């Protein structure tokens, strides 16, 4: 069961009597190829036997009431310098090993922090309670642990260290305890913390941990005392533990009825109102003091933050408190509207049930809809479905994702969940590239027609690839195209489709509100995310060659225009039905033409001495492979692609022969603060200005492309202006939230 070690990284774990947790922890590490070190501090159960099945080394350490001593001992036992620290009640939820390797090579003096989701039991299931960031990845030659409990990572040489966020997520159940377990752990911690306080009486971090210790055993008066003492020091408001101490102190003040004292937080508002958690707390403080307009203002402000540490502070909890205030004021319509924005939050659900019988109108918000989305086994479609799902939920919608299924058994199980979701009503369905668009019901027609529900079929590709499905569109089907030419195609060639609209894809900003890395400091000159998809086994005929020659000479044309020009000149009386069949038969000529252009675009740059970093499949089959300026990598996840864009000066894009549409790759590049370099389209020219928001190149003049790129790379100030303008333009109008809002307006 042990994993073959393939990466120079050691995972270090300390354990004692963890037989209930350690296997889940260790098994989550199996896919990654790390050395695993388990240090046992005196287990009397099966912890060591279970660990031996997974770990490369299980060693004993005589417990001495010092967690740092045990941690540092585990570092000495590791064969590698780079350490990933994990606890037994944690496991890996999401990790990209290549990101860790990139971090080792490019940030050798830094510490990597991960996102930790703290779970608690609710109705027999784990649910998210809060999220924190914790430092876990470091070089043991530069860092070690200090503090006998709640140990902290510290530089060995005593210098401050840069801490960077990784896109690794771990889950943690250490706070999910019975009352007896919580009190026992709290008392143990307090004993060690008072011992540490005697050694470090001027350390505010120890006072913070003492406050937490008393909070664990629900002695909130003592918690207030130690939090207050910790904040009496001259602490740095930017430190994560200081922000947490401020939040915890405010909560403890409210729990002990010290509402007027808590109102003193107005004096520190400007320093600490940088998180949804603090703003939400401020709303609760105003509410506790009867200052309801001020409370509503703060709760509204909290919902504008993208992230929070305490689950719901920027969403359902803030909306729930607004609803409580509305109900107290007798505004039942708005109370119901805000309760419904809370999704499945149980107190809100109960309030809706309690109030719904007393009002004729629910006052349901314009965006609070119930939406079904269909997932996919194709990663780009699954990514887009997840983006829409997140955007819709942020707008107060309740959503259900029908996951991709490859067996009848799993399809049936998911269908049962869909029917349960339908019991409370469905306002719309979103499908992607036709999966779920028809949903036939044993000769009774489409499920969406039976339910009288509009189904938006979002096509990421040209509709000519989906002729078989579009020819039997449900009556309630709406085909959504990412290019206006595609809308025209559907109108003309797909008579079964009654409704259609144009909606381009959107973009995602990986780290909102975080300052973008300056262009001059980015390490990747030119980045291309995309595969080389040339169908070598495609048999060209004379029509294919003629059409491709026409498109090369007239790259502003669509494939259907080129085919029609050829057919109508020879056979003027060709019907649309006949023309459609011919277009479909030659549709892969467009795919290969795009591949040919993609190769030529990269070749023009590489052979001019410009280094292009490419992530995708198929490139190893090209003559560019092996060129020192052609840096080729395997495909990566969207999250990692965005991470690379954050470190790229120029992101190169090639449109998939969309002549009047957009692409998520363009908006993603802009939203990560890079210069987007792309061939143009009518839609792009309407929305962006060349050399201001992005840079266009022409497929008809690829010989000019190397000089365009060289000129950009020589002038970082010029690139910075374009990147800044591009970011502003994309964030104002071209995110997934904007696209979701456009769809909801139609409802």
Image (cartoon, rainbow, N blue to C red):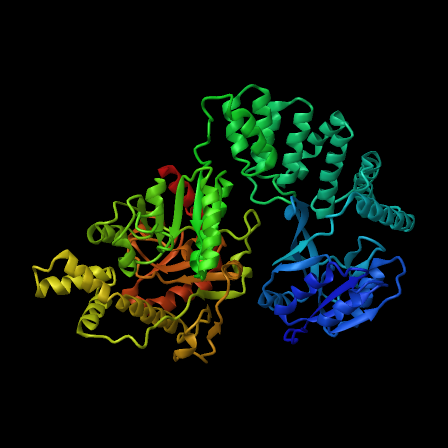
359 or 605: which is nearer to us? Answer: 359
Q: Is residue 281 left or right of residue 96?
A: right
Query: Which image quadrant for residue 737?
Result: top left
Q: Is residue 204 visible?
A: no
Query: Which image quadrant for residue 591?
Result: bottom left
Q: Is residue 321 visible?
A: yes
435 or 129: which is nearer to us? Answer: 435
Q: Is residue 539 left or right of residue 400?
A: left
Residue at position x 54%, y 38% in the image: 343
Which quadrant would the N terminus be assigned to in this image? bottom right
Residue at position x 29%, y 69% in the image: 593
Q: Is residue 124 left or right of residue 205?
A: left
From the top left corner, tell me how far across and down residue 109 is, in percent.
Answer: 69, 65
Q: State the residue lying farthest toward the top.
A: 330
Which quadrant would the C terminus be assigned to in this image? top left
From the top left corner, tell me how far across and down residue 409 is, in percent.
Answer: 47, 58
Q: Is residue 519 left or right of residue 54?
A: left
Q: State the residue lying farthest toward the front.
A: 442
From the top left corner, tell me how far across and down residue 578 is, in percent.
Answer: 15, 60
């Amino acid at each position: 069961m042990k994993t073959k070690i393939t990466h120079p990284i050691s995972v270090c774990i300390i354990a004692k009597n963890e037989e209930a947790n350690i296997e889940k922890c260790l098994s989550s590490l199996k896919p990654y190829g790390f050395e695993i070190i388990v240090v046992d501090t005196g287990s009397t159960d099966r912890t060591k036997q279970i660990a031996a099945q997974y770990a490369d080394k299980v060693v004993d350490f005589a417990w001495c009431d010092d967690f740092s001593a045990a941690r540092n001992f585990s570092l000495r036992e590791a064969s590698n310098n780079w350490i990933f620290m994990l606890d037994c009640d944690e496991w890996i939820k999401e990790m990209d090993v290549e990101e860790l390797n990139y971090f080792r090579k490019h940030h050798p003096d830094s510490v990597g922090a991960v996102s930790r989701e703290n779970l608690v039991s609710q109705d027999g299931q784990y649910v998210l309670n809060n999220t924190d960031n914790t430092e876990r990845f470091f070089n043991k030659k530069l860092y070690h642990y200090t503090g006998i409990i709640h140990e902290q990572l510290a530089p060995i040489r005593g210098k401050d260290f840069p801490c960077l966020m990784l896109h690794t997520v771990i889950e943690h159940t250490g706070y999910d305890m019975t009352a007896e377990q919580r009190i026992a752990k709290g008392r143990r911690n307090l004993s060690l913390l008072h011992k540490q306080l005697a050694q470090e009486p001027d350390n505010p971090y120890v006072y913070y941990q003492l406050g937490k210790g008393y909070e664990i055993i629900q002695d909130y008066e003592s918690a207030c005392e130690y939090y207050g003492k910790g904040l009496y020091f001259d602490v740095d408001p930017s430190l994560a533990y200081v922000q947490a101490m401020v939040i915890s102190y405010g909560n403890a003040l409210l729990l002990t009825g010290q509402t007027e004292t808590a109102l003193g937080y107005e004096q520190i508002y400007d320093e600490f109102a940088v998180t949804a958690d603090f703003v939400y707390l401020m709303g609760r403080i105003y509410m506790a003091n009867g200052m309801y307009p001020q409370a509503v203002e703060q709760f509204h402000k909290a919902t504008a933050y993208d992230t929070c540490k305490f689950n719901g502070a920027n969403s359902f909890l803030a909306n729930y408190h607004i609803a409580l205030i509305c109900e107290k004021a007798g505004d039942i319509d708005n109370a119901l509207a805000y309760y419904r924005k809370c999704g499945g939050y149980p107190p809100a659900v109960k309030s809706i049930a309690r109030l719904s019988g007393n009002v004729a109108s629910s006052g349901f918000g314009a965006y609070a809809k119930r939406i079904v989305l269909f997932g996919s086994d194709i990663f780009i479609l699954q990514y887009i479905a997840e983006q829409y799902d997140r955007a819709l939920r942020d707008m107060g919608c309740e959503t259900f994702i029908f996951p991709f299924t490859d067996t009848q058994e799993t399809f049936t199980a998911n269908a049962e969940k869909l029917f349960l979701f339908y019991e409370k009503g469905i306002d719309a369905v979103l499908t992607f590239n036709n999966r779920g668009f028809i949903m036939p019901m044993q000769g009774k027609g489409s499920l969406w027609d039976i339910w009288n529900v509009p189904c938006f079929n979002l096509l990421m590709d040209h509709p000519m690839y989906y002729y078989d499905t579009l020819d039997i569109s449900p009556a309630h089907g709406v085909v959504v195209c990412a290019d206006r030419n595609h809308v025209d195609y559907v109108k003309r060639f797909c008579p079964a489709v009654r409704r259609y609209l144009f909606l381009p894809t959107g973009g995602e900003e990986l780290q909102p509100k975080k300052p973008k890395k300056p262009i001059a400091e980015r390490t990747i000159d030119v980045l291309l995310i995309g595969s080389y998809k040339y169908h070598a086994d495609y048999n060209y005929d004379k029509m294919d060659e003629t059409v491709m020659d026409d498109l090369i000479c007239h790259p502003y044309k669509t494939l259907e225009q080129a085919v029609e020009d050829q057919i109508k000149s020879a056979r003027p009386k060709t019907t649309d039905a006949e023309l459609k069949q011919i277009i479909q038969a030659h549709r892969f000529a467009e795919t290969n033409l795009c591949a040919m252009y993609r190769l030529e675009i990269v070749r023009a740059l590489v052979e001019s001495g410009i280094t292009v970093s490419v992530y995708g499949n198929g490139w190893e089959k090209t003559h560019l492979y092996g060129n020192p300026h052609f840096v080729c990598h395997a495909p990566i996840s969207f999250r990692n692609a965005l991470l690379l864009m954050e470190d790229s000066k120029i992101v190169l894009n090639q449109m998939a022969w969309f002549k009047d549409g957009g692409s998520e790759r363009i908006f993603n590049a802009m939203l990560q603060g890079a210069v987007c370099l792309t061939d143009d389209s009518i839609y792009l020219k309407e929305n962006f200005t060349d050399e201001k928001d992005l840079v266009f190149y022409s497929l008809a003049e690829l010989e000019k492309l190397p000089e365009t790129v060289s000129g950009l790379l020589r002038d970082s100030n010029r690139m910075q202006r374009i990147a800044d303008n591009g970011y502003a333009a994309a964030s104002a109008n071209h995110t997934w939230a904007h696209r979701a809002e456009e769809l909801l307006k139609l409802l």
